[in-house]
Image: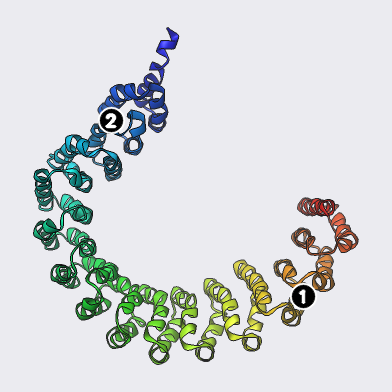
Amino acid sequence: MAMMDEPLYPIAILIDELKNEDIQLRLNSIRRLSTIARALGEERTRKELIPFLSENNDDEDEVLLAMAEELGVFIPYVGGVEHAHVLLPPLETLCTVEETCVRDKAVESLCRIGAQMKESDIVDWFIPVVKRLAAGEWFTARVSSCGIFHIAYPSAHDQLKAELRTIYGQLCQDDMPMVRRAAASSLGKFAATVEQSYLKAEIMSIFDDLTQDDQDSVRLLAVEGCAALGKLLEPQDCVGHILPVIVNFSQDKSWRVRYMVANQLYELCEAVGPEYSRENLVPAYVRLLRDNEAEVRIAAAGKVTKFCRILSPQLAIQHILPCVKELSSDSSQHVRSALASVIMGMAPVLGKDATIEQLLPIFLSLLKDEFPDVRLNIISKLDQVNQVIGIDLLSQSLLPAIVELAEDRHWRVRLAIIEYIPLLASQLGVGFFDDKLGALCMQWLEDKVFSIRDAAANNLKRLAEEFGPEWAMEHIIPQVLEKINNPHYLYRMTILQAISLLAPVMGAEITCQKLLPVVINSSKDRVPNIKFNVAKVLQALIPILDQSVVEKTVKPCLVELSEDPDVDVRYYANQALQACDQIMMSS
């Protein structure tokens, strides 16, 4: 008898836990649905578990969200695709709840299940769900229905397709703005499944109504529809239907709609094609760049390089460049920052002469901007300009600004400059680097901010790799080793880190002759932090050095440190000694 009762046990626990007051127990029970379904078997899952879930009226959104998610992957547990329709009723109920994230997840799960169902089952089971939701009394059901039309439509016969198109058109004219918003948002997906003949005749008229909606939240979602529909239409239809809408939207009375156009403009240009973009969308884009709302200007400024790529250099210089000049001194720092992040990409589009004459002065003014993010965005993209104007001009015009920024009061700006130095060094060449930037690289080793000192040490390693060990031996090593006597222990630690980074680049001989003695001397430092860093550096040097040097010099030093009064020093010294022994044994 006990054996017969065993399969009942999981469902009994589930029911008990789903009715428990503790939300965590209810949640755990839902997350274990697949385990329970496996225990019950496919038939009992269909006949008992799914109906129970359909009737479950939990009021906790977290539990409902978990259920909506679980049901989306439940097809294998109900007996495969032919029984998938049994999962629709609980998900249909979840599509009507008030919480948006639960509805969205239920729609996602319905789409996933519908995509796997047979065509006949979609007609018999899925399409009735779409119709019931679309005719729902509560707006929540009608909102959810908009997201599943594109799954239902391809499997329907002609008469049913006509009915679905009519229902969708009604949803686009619903009294509730939330429903119209959902319909506008899903229009692109639905339109992609509709036949070309109905696309122009019916879908475009629905779209036109949405573009003239009195709610700006609906119109701004219609902007996204422009790009989606534009890709579905023939080029001439796209120009006839989509282009006028984009131009009107760029002058919309709501700044949120204009912001959306600015954000989507490049995709919209791709939809209508470069030729018509040049003629019709340049004036619209210029208007957006000069918009009275900063948010719109930010979105437009961020697309300036992408937009210029569609245009010829002459058009970009004639129409876009004057706006870029205005934006570089915009009253909003966020507009200037958005411009700074993309303006460097204009150099390859405009060519060398226009970059030198027109863009360089803008770069320089942005490099001196009072807002650090603007300066940062320019620095991080300097290599794009170098490819166009060449290193001589770059060094003459931009280098003074870079040297100035190397001492910027904002540490993130200094950090960006350090990270750019190896690239600059490789382009400037060794002679120029020694004159202008060598001293800066040493200066950063004694910065007040740890991240700068850390980056400076890594920077020296990258420079040594770029210019070779001989150059490093002459220009880096002596100056680094001098600084080991700095009275502040944090700066001495930075030098130890620089030594451990430089050693693999410099090779065994220089490490043994020049770097190792400095590290060994530092083991006598009075500060425990220095001593345990010495142990870490010595551990890093062991693979580089000859075995005889390790035995005679490194090991005795580590043994001495392993008897230090400080517990951390002893720990790291013992770690290094173990590494020492392992390397000895392996060799």
Counting from the top left corner in percent of width and height, residue 331 is at 33, 79
Badge 2 density bin: few <14, some 14–19, many ≥20, Cα 10 Å: some
Most extreme residue toward the right, as rendered?
552
* Relative side of 546 to 313, left or right: right
What residue is rendered at 69% in x and 76% in y? 464
What residue is rendered at 87% in x and 54% in y? 559
Q: Identify which residue, 17 or 22, lies in the foreground.
A: 17
Dot 2 and dot 1 residues touching (CB under 8 Å):
no
Residue 195's tag is: none
* Relative side of 4 to 459, left or right: left
Counting from the top left corner in percent of width and height, residue 417 is at 55, 76
Mark sitting earlier along the chain (2/1): 2
Badge 1 density bin: few <14, some 14–19, many ≥20, Cα 10 Å: some
Q: Identify which residue, 573 or 186, lies in the foreground.
A: 186
The kind of residue tagged 2 is His
Q: Give the labeled residue for mark 1.
A: 481
Picture quadrant of residue 494: bottom right
Indicate the secondary structure of the residue bearing disc 2.
helix
Indicate the secondary structure of the residue bearing disc 1.
helix
Q: Give the labeled residue for mark 2.
A: 83
Quadrant for the N terminus, please: top left
Q: Nearer the viewer, mark 2 or mark 1?
A: 2
* Relative side of 476 to 555, left or right: left
Quadrant for the C terminus, please: bottom right
